[in-house]
Image: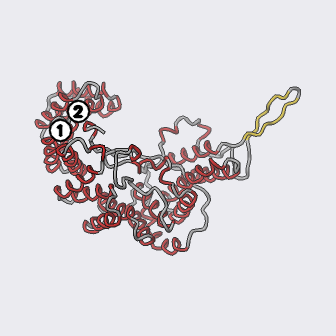
């Protein structure tokens, strides 16, 4: 890892596939379930709801006939497709086994259209097909747990928390190492975006559990909390994490998740959030993401120095940075503090943090882009333009993505300061470097072009 790559980046979002028929739950899960279920009503799905677990753009290649509706293949009773094949003088029918992956994709497509009942039906149909193919145990061992996770997601989205817990317990019971499955790849990145598998990290760098807890029900509650958090139901997520802790009092990842959701959602008070994160670190002192979330919380609540200290520890867990020197490590930590205040919409402390970082590492071009953005948030277009021009002077021509970002913000700064021609030139350059910005840029260009 080189210093030029040290801008904290969020890990990629997963797309999850997982589920099967719920089996009987343990007694402990049923005992604690009652306290959580009344919160199901808070997990309401609005018309504007976007399913965070399925990449709908990847499903556009499905034929219209594969969309939600009556499936002609893989019915629960074992119906099959047939086709006529030539066998010399006689035409015979060849049985074609139904494709569980195609049925699963139909379930995903139904989710994209918010046809939740049809999605559940397709997933269960895919499970039945996998079960019928018992000769292919290798696929069944992987695909059934993944389908159970998908089923649990839809059940949580539709307020069936009891069903979601049952599906999660079934999924985790089938694969106790479930956290290493591809859908959970977001857990295998550090707060600086470093893959856990690269070997450049110490401590416990996983963002969430990778193996089942004892009892298994604690893991089911954790994963339910994780789903509820992602669909925008923080109250219910908090109760799920708390139930996981009741079942497994030494569950450090659950304390970490509990404190983090309190901070990010604004639910719960400051002291309880910090206490949960402190407890996570008492149980597992080297839980890297708990140090990060604690630093985020401290900075969010106004203690930039304490946030910096926590982030500095996070940087030290990145053993690949051991040779870059303390000033560069401190610059990374101060940028992390600045990012918190940018998330908060609080420009002044963000500027202070980014300025500290740039003083320590003045040749890091993305740091000047960040500071320029903060000045834009503050409304100081003069300083924003200065920082963005500095970044462009430092960026190589090959750094296309960063150059596009710098030109985009520079065009915005020129626009806000009514320097129309310079704004148009910068925005057109940004669009040429990154066509994905075209729609946003065109709106601004239309405004500029309408000026007298």
In the image: residue 190, left or right of residue 243: left
Number of callouts in the render? 2
In the image: residue 359, left or right of residue 297: left
In the image: residue 215, left or right of residue 286: right
Classify mark 2: residues with Cα within 10 Å, few (<14), some (14-19) or many (20+). many
Could you say which is closer to the camera, residue 343 or residue 286? 286
Q: CA distance from mark 1 to mark 2?
A: 9 Å
Residue extending furthest toward the right: 89
Toward which corner of the image does residue 245 lie, by quadrant?
bottom left
Q: Which residue is mark 1?
A: 372
Q: Residue at x 28, y 37 (%)?
A: 2
Q: Which residue is mark 2?
A: 406
Q: Earlier in the sequence, mark 1 or mark 2?
A: 1
Quadrant containing the C terminus in the rendered view: top left
Quadrant containing the N terminus in the rendered view: top left
Residue extending furthest toward the left: 382
Q: Give the structural element (helix, strand or loop) at label 2.
A: helix
Q: Residue at x 17, y 44 (%)?
A: 327
Toward which corner of the image does residue 35 lie, by quadrant?
bottom left
- Checking the image for residue 299, the label placed there is none
Could you say which is closer to the camera, residue 82 or residue 301? 301
Residue 172, position in %: x, y?
A: 53, 59
Residue 86, position in %: x, y?
A: 82, 28
User: Relative to 222, does residue 9 appear above or below in the rendering?
Assistant: above
Could you say which is closer to the camera, residue 124 or residue 134? 134
Residue 192, position in %: x, y?
A: 31, 46
Q: Give the structural element (helix, strand or loop) at label 1.
A: helix
User: Relative to 395, does residue 242 appear above or below in the rendering?
Assistant: below
Judging from the image, the colouring scheme is secondary structure
Classify mark 1: residues with Cα within 10 Å, few (<14), some (14-19) or many (20+). many
Residue 220, position in %: x, y?
A: 49, 63
**Cβ–Cβ under 8 Å for marks 1 and 2:** yes
């Amino acid at each position: 890892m080189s210093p030029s790559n040290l801008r904290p980046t969020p890990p990629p979002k997963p797309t999850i596939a997982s589920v099967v028929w719920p089996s009987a739950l343990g007694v402990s899960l049923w005992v604690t379930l009652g306290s959580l279920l009344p919160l199901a009503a808070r997990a309401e799905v609005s018309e504007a709801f976007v399913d965070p677990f399925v990449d709908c753009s990847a499903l556009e290649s499905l034929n219209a006939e594969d969309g939600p509706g009556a499936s002609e293949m893989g019915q629960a009773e074992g119906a099959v497709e047939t086709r006529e094949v030539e066998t010399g003088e006689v035409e015979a029918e060849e049985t074609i086994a139904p494709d569980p992956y195609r049925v699963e994709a139909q379930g995903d497509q139904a989710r994209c259209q918010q046809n939740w009942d049809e999605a559940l039906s397709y997933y269960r149909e895919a499970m039945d097909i996998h079960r019928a193919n018992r000769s292919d145990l290798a696929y069944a061992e992987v695909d059934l747990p993944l389908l159970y996770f998908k089923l649990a997601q839809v059940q949580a989205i539709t307020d069936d928390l009891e069903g979601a817990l049952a599906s999660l317990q079934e999924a985790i019971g089938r694969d106790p190492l479930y956290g290493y499955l591809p859908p959970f790849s977001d857990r295998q990145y550090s707060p600086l975006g470093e893959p856990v598998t690269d070997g450049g990290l110490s401590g416990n760098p996983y963002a969430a559990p990778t193996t089942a807890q004892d009892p298994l029900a604690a893991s089911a509650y954790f994963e339910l909390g994780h789903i509820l958090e992602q669909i925008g139901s923080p109250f219910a997520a908090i109760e799920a994490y708390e139930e996981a802790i009741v079942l497994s009092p030494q569950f450090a990842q659950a304390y970490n998740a509990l404190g983090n959701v309190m901070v990010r959602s604004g639910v719960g008070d400051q002291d309880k959030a910090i206490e949960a994160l402190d407890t996570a670190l008492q149980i597992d002192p080297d839980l890297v993401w708990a140090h990060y979330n604690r630093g985020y919380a401290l900075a969010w609540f106004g203690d930039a120095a304490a946030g910096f200290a926590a982030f500095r520890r996070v940087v030290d867990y990145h053993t690949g940075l051991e040779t870059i020197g303390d000033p560069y490590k401190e610059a990374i930590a101060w940028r992390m503090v600045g990012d918190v205040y940018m998330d908060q919409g609080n420009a002044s402390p963000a500027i202070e943090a980014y300025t500290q970082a740039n003083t320590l590492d003045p040749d890091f071009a993305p740091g000047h882009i960040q500071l320029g953005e903060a000045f834009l948030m503050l409304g100081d277009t003069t300083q924003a333009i200065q920082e963005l021009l500095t970044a462009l002077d430092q960026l190589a021509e090959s750094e296309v993505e960063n150059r596009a970002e710098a030109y985009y913000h520079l065009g915005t700064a020129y626009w806000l300061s009514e320097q129309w021609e310079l704004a148009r030139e910068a925005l057109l350059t940004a669009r040429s470097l990154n066509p994905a910005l075209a729609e946003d840029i065109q709106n601004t260009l239309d405004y500029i072009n309408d000026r007298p």
